[in-house]
Amino acid sequence: MGWDGTNGNQPRELTIIQNFVHELGIWEKQSSFYFQAKSCQNYIANNIFFNGPRAGINFNDGFGGGSHIYKNLLFNTCRESGDHGIWDRQVYVTNVRYGTPSVIKAYDEISYNFMIANYNSQEAVDNDDGSCYYYTHHNFLVYSGNGMKSDSVDMTTDMTYVGEGFSISDQLAGHNDVFYNNTLVLTSNAQNYGSFDCTSSQPTWPMLGNNVISTPSGNASLTGLCNLPLKEFQNKYAIDLGSVVQSLPSDQELLNQATNMIFQ
């Protein structure tokens, strides 16, 4: 096929729903519950997967886009590995986004999932190696060093229980990542609730705002961004406006919020 996917002769519009999968990796370590390559516009929903050596779901490339990962439960993944995620190293031309040939893929969507990123998971959602045009929202993401890592994605209205909320690469101006309207429950009074290259020019920074960051102390003078307390960061750069630091919710409050979000 090469780079030209405009003839439509690739797997498309597949439905993978209501599967119960576990104990992968007995004979093949480089395996996931669901893997796609040179495929697009697929629907992966209402599946349960646990006990695997690497990622639970993995997209090999950015071919076409338009797939939706929806209301899945994933846990006990990355039991024998760590840093790996979605790739997009090869440019493909498809008609998916605009109806005419383009190298720009349609958005893939990740929403209303419950992901427990235990074992060696660095992130619950790992957009890596040039992957872009992902819309990640309304997920309950538990554990991992970072809630989400990205090269170019929109991340909104997620709930995470993590050590750090996000780790984002700097972007070309006009192609910025978005981290907006998320609820973070941090396991420590971290100095920074997320990380990006604070030394790069401000137009390449992620778009931030209206996030709720809960910490053990609830002290806004201890937690912020770029090694500054949150209010000082907001006043200095006029970025991440509307975000606040507060005390930890109770376990029941957190579970109620997560349940209401996932099952709304």
Image (tube, rainbow, N blue to C red):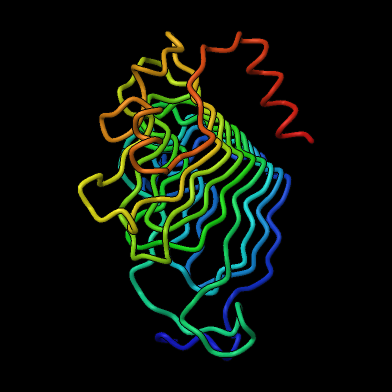
Instruction: State the residue in front, 75 or 239.
Output: 239
Residue sitting nearer the eye, 189 or 94 = 189
- Report the label total: 0
| Residue furthest to the left | 199
Q: Going 71% across and 43% down the picture, which residue do you hit?
A: 46
The residue most toward the right is: 264
Residue at 52% in and 58% down? 134
Picture quarter containing residue 140? top right
Vertical comparison of 232 with 44: above or below: above
Asked whether, in this view, residue 249 is left or right of residue 112, the answer is left
Location of residue 109 in the rendering, given as x and y in whole percent from the top left corner: 60, 56
Q: Nearer the viewer, residue 131 or 39?
A: 131
The C terminus lies in which quarter of the figure? top right
> Is 98 positioned to the left or the right of 208 in the image?
right
Left or right: residue 56 versus residue 169 is: right
The location of residue 186, given as percent across then percent down, is: 44, 21
Q: Residue placed at 58% from the left, 39% from the top?
A: 181
Residue extending furthest front? 235
Residue 76, above or below 56 = above
Classify residue 112 by image quadrant. Answer: top right
Q: Position of residue 1 (x, y in %)?
A: 45, 87
Rendered location of residue 184, percent (x, y): 51, 27
Instruction: Give the answer, above or below, for where 172 lies relative to 200.
Output: below
Residue occupying the point 61% across, 8% down: 250
